[in-house]
C-alpha cells in the first residue's frame, strides 16, 4: 500500500521522532509499515524516506538499495539511527525532498560518516558510508530529528514541473 507523503508545512516534519522499542519490530503492524514505506519511496522516485514523511513520528528510515552503503542486494532499513563524522571533509551538493516538492537547494554534508542503528530485525548494525549514500543517510536522519533540508540549504530554487 502506498502512503501519501506529508509535505511542508506540517508540524510532524518539524518534531523529533520517538525512538522505537526493538521488541515492537516483530509486530505485523511494524513490518507492514516498513514494506509500505519502501513501496512509497520507490513509487515517488525517492532514494530515501523517513517515517515522519508518511505521518509516523517514529525513528525509522529506509534507503534505496542502490544507495544503501551495504551493497545492492536489499533496501536499507535503519531503526533509531545515529551517525558521526569520520572525516572533516564536507561538500555542498544539490538536494531535494519528497516533503518539499519542487524545491532544490545546495546542502553542506559530511563526505564520510559512521552509522549506528538497529536493522529490520532489531539487531545492532554499524557501518561507514561515504559520498552520496552518506548524504542520503544524513538527510533522512535529519527528518527523524525534525529538520528539513531547506533549513540548511543555500541557493534554494523552485523548479517548475514539466
Image (cartoon, grey):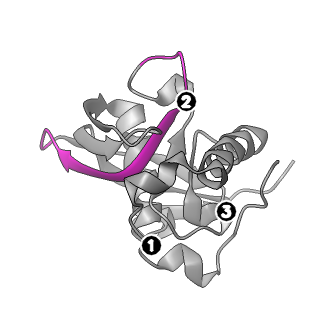
Count numbered badges in the picture: 3
- According to the picture, the residue beneath numbered tag 2 turns out to be 75
- According to the picture, the residue beneath numbered tag 1 turns out to be 146
- According to the picture, the residue beneath numbered tag 3 turns out to be 54
Label 3, label 2: how many angstroms apart (C-alpha)?
18 Å
Q: Position of residue 86 (x, y in %)?
A: 14, 39
Residue 40 included in the magenta stretch of the image: no
Which badge, 1 or 3, comes first in the chain's sequence?
A: 3
Which label sits in the foreground, 1 or 2?
2
Label 1, label 2: how many angstroms apart (C-alpha)?
23 Å
Residue shown at 44% from the left, 38% from the top: 121
Region in magenta: 71-88
Q: Position of residue 153 (x, y in %)?
A: 43, 63
Residue shown at 45% from the left, 29% from the top: 68
Helix, strand or loop at mark 2: loop
Q: Is residue 35 left or right of residue 1?
A: left
Q: Is residue 2 left or right of residue 104?
A: right
Amino acid at each position: 500500500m502506498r502512503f501519501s507523503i506529508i509535505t511542508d508545512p506540517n508540524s510532524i516534519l518539524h518534531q523529533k521522532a520517538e525512538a522505537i522499542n526493538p521488541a515492537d519490530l516483530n509486530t505485523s503492524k511494524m513490518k507492514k509499515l516498513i514494506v509500505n514505506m519502501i513501496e512509497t519511496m520507490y513509487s515517488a522516485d525517492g532514494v530515501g524516506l523517513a517515517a515522519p514523511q508518511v505521518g509516523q513520528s517514529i525513528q525509522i528510515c529506509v534507503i534505496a538499495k542502490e544507495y544503501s552503503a551495504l551493497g545492492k542486494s536489499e533496501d536499507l532499513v535503519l531503526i533509531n539511527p545515529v551517525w558521526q563524522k569520520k572525516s572533516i571533509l564536507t561538500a555542498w551538493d544539490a538536494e531535494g525532498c519528497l516533503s518539499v516538492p519542487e524545491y532544490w537547494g545546495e546542502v553542506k554534508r559530511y563526505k564520510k560518516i559512521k552509522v549506528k542503528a538497529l536493522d529490520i530485525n532489531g539487531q545492532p548494525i554499524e557501518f561507514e558510508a561515504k559520498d552520496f549514500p552518506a548524504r542520503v543517510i544524513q538527510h533522512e536522519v535529519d527528518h527523524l530529528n525534525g529538520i528539513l533540508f531547506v533549513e540548511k540549504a543555500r541557493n534554494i530554487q523552485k523548479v517548475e514541473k514539466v
